[in-house]
Image (cartoon, rainbow, N blue to C red):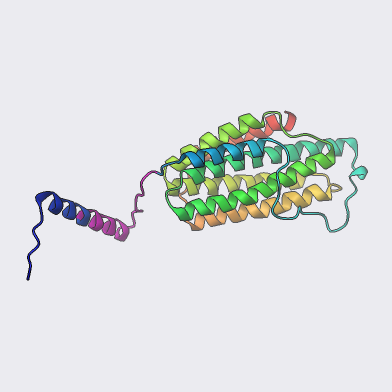
Amino acid sequence: MTLLHQTPDASAKIQGEKGQGLLSANNERRGHPLRYPDPMISGDELIASADLALRTLRRGARAGRPMPRAGTPADDGALSADERRLSGALMRVNHVGEVCAQALYAAQALTARTPELRAQMVAAGREETDHLAWTERRLDELGDRTSLLNPLWYAGAFAIGLAAGRAGDRISLGFVVETERQVEAHLASHLERLPQADADSRAVVAQMKDDEARHADEALAAGGAAMPAPVRWLMRSAARVMTRTAHVF
């Protein structure tokens, strides 16, 4: 039998690896989440993020799903001037929300520590692209415009998404849960405010509401942590500022 000689450095390395393995196992048994290293963001990913920002901010987003429509053909000409104005303002606010969603999911995908979470963020972001395209198209049909402040909304949301992602995957998922729950409630309020005659806008908002609820459920099931009350309050306050501003600008 040949005896293998280990140098002190090699022995220390092996003991260190064993210790890390035992620590990870103990953490799992105690219910502590394993810590993954902070993700390294490549140059290609930064370029892709910049490309997404440009595609989001310029007009012409492409949906992967058909735009929801009312069961019977809607006649926008039947809307009064006030109804058309109200629908346009509400759909502009919803479009801003989708601009922010693109930025949030892109930033959180960049900072995800596991491939599974990154894939979940990317998949949700694709559905938000559908919402972006639908709200833009509906604004065109109503003869209205998107927000003049979209670059500002995108930049702010991207920074918030980076911060949430850097805080860890459970916090990032919890941020998604809270964001989507608040958006779901916001869309429910829009369904109450949209004119009954604007059946097409109502169909779009109803589908968006269903999608946002599912995104929240998926993030919660993936291990999202509950956000502290002060964070939830800050999120609601920021959303109110955005909503009131985008309603006009």
Q: Residue furthest front?
A: 2
Residue 103 inside the magenta-drawn segment: no
Which residue is at 23% across, 58% downward? Answer: 22
Percent position (x, y) of residue 55?
65, 39
Q: Name the side, left or right, on which 9 lies relative to 155.
A: left
Judging depth in this view, the residue of 196 and 62 nearest the camera is: 62
Percent position (x, y) of residue 45?
50, 42
Specify the segment rendered in magenta: 19-38
Percent position (x, y) of residue 101?
61, 42
Q: For residue 27, what is the image quadrant?
A: bottom left
* Any part of residue 165 in sight: yes
Which residue is at 60% across, 34% downward? Answer: 154
Which residue is at 33% across, 54% downward? Answer: 32
Percent position (x, y) of residue 206?
73, 52
Which residue is at 90% across, 48% downward? Answer: 75
Residue 35 inside the magenta-drawn segment: yes
In the rendered image, the vertical position of residue 203 relative to residue 107, given as above or below: below
* Any part of residue 87 in sight: no
Q: Residue furthest bottom?
A: 1
Judging depth in this view, the residue of 224 and 124 nearest the camera is: 124
Q: Quadrant of the C terminus?
A: top right
Q: Name the side, left or right, on which 196 lies relative to 23.
A: right
